[in-house]
Image: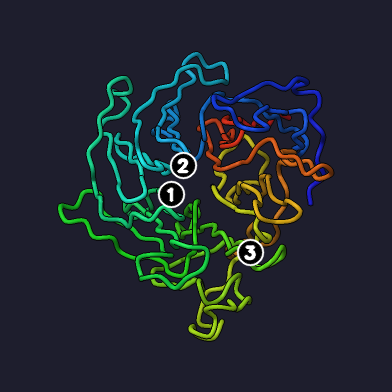
């Protein structure tokens, strides 16, 4: 693990970033530990249930979805002081509009069963209107919130989580699908199967192959199974759910209905039991040291049903030249007090800005942080 420095010098007071009456809703940046040279600040405050992040082509507009709320936001740092000073509510009354993606001037938003499009969004921040691109995804709320992103093939990738903790659902569930948003007859194509609930994925900058996080099943005890980081270089791979978990844990209810574990794809890395890895991005910027280039940042939302909490951190996953995981290191931690088990924040998504700094959303503290590096 990387040795961290305690950033008590950066901010010495706590302040509320919440627009809602949530417990433990005070940002305490003095508790966050980062590697030497890194700094953290609040880039946007009072963003209720800040979840998935996306940006326009030049990074001047940041789009924010949420799960518990019903709104989609656009944020801007118009004066360049390193903090968002403008906020637009692009839509309200939506159903779990967690996913946001931007392409060719348009914003796409994923609800539970619908994909929406806001055309020419940059010129319509004050008067946004959307159209329904597709509305035939399942309407099940359990794992129904979605992370979305456009792949190198121009297709919009849309996961459909399992509608349960553990079950053997119909094929469209527990999958990652993709759609052509410009088609006149959209039909989701299943790209990957056996994926319980992914809320973050990205493509390797060089190989253009898909990587994604996946949340393991619950109610098998504190230590089983691990959540996963997976690698899907091609269509048609099956990652085990609901028969096998983390590559080698046979499900006590459905394991005998599946094939031998070798018939399924084992994770590229185990992420720890119940750590809830969500957003992930490959780092391609020049601001951070070279060791971070083309490697992965992952936001671990943290455990909710473990007798001793774990997660609540950002990690850095290092790959070798063959896209094999070398190791995972803790990059940022301090949202969880291990001694008292108190939690004041939960990282959700990460997004690299054009200058190479990193944004991190937090749906508990209702904030978006900015992590930067300076020699």
**156 left or right of 43?**
left
Label 1: how many Cα within 10 Å (few below 14, some 14–19, many 20+): many
Label 3: how many Cα within 10 Å (few below 14, some 14–19, many 20+): many
**258 left or right of 102?**
right
The percent coordinates of residue 305 (x first, y second) are 66, 55
**Residue farthest to the left?**
184
- The mark found on residue 269 in the picture is 3
**16 left or right of 278?**
right
The percent coordinates of residue 294 (x first, y second) are 57, 50
Q: CA distance from mark 3 to mark 1?
A: 24 Å
What element does badge 2 sit on?
loop
Examine the rendering and report whether any part of residue 291 can be seen. Answer: no
Residue assigned mark 1: 145
**Residue farthest to the right?**
339
Q: Is residue 243 above or below residue 327?
A: below
Q: CA distance from mark 3 to mark 2?
A: 27 Å
Q: CA distance from mark 1 to mark 2?
A: 6 Å
What element does badge 1 sit on?
loop
Q: Quadrant of residue 161?
A: bottom left
**362 left or right of 149?**
right
Residues at discs 3 and 2 in contact (Cβ within 8 Å): no
What element does badge 3 sit on?
strand
Q: In what quadrant of the picture does the C terminus appear? A: top right
Residue assigned mark 2: 67
Q: Earlier in the sequence, mark 3 or mark 2?
A: 2
The percent coordinates of residue 226 (x first, y second) are 65, 64
């Amino acid at each position: 693990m990387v040795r961290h420095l305690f950033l008590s010098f950066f901010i010495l007071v706590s302040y509320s970033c919440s627009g809602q009456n949530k417990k433990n809703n005070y940002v305490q940046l003095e508790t966050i530990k980062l590697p030497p040279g890194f700094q953290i600040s609040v880039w946007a405050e009072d963003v209720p249930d800040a979840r998935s992040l996306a940006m326009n082509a030049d990074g001047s507009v940041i789009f924010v979805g949420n799960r518990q709320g019903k709104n989609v936001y656009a944020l801007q740092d118009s004066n360049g002081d390193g903090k968002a000073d403008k906020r637009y509510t692009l839509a309200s009354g939506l159903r779990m509009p967690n996913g946001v993606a931007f392409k060719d001037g348009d914003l796409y938003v994923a609800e539970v069963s619908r994909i929406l499009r806001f055309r020419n969004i940059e010129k319509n921040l004050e008067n946004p209107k959307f159209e329904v691109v597709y509305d035939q995804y399942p309407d099940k709320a359990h794992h129904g919130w979605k992370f979305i992103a456009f792949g190198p093939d121009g297709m919009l990738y849309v996961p459909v989580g399992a509608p349960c903790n553990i079950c053997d659902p119909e094929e469209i569930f527990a999958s990652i699908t993709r759609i052509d948003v410009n088609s006149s007859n959209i039909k989701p194509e299943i790209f990957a199967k056996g994926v319980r609930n992914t809320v973050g994925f990205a493509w390797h900058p060089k190989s253009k192959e898909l990587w994604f996080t996946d949340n393991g099943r619950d109610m098998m005890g504190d230590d089983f199974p691990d959540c996963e980081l997976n690698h899907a270089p091609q269509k048609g791979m099956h990652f085990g759910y609901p028969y096998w978990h983390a590559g080698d844990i046979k499900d006590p209810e459905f394991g005998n209905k599946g094939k031998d574990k070798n018939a399924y794809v084992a994770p590229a890395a185990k992420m720890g039991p119940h750590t809830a890895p969500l957003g992930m991005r490959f780092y391609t910027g020049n601001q951070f040291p070279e060791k971070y280039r083309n490697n992965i940042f992952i936001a671990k939302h943290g455990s909710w049903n473990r007798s001793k909490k774990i997660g609540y951190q950002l990690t850095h996953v290092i790959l070798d030249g063959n896209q094999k995981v070398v190791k995972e290191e803790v990059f940022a931690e301090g949202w969880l007090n291990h001694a008292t088990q108190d939690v004041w924040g939960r990282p959700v998504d990460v997004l690299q800005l054009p200058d190479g700094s990193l944004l991190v959303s937090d749906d508990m503290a209702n904030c978006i942080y900015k992590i930067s590096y300076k020699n």
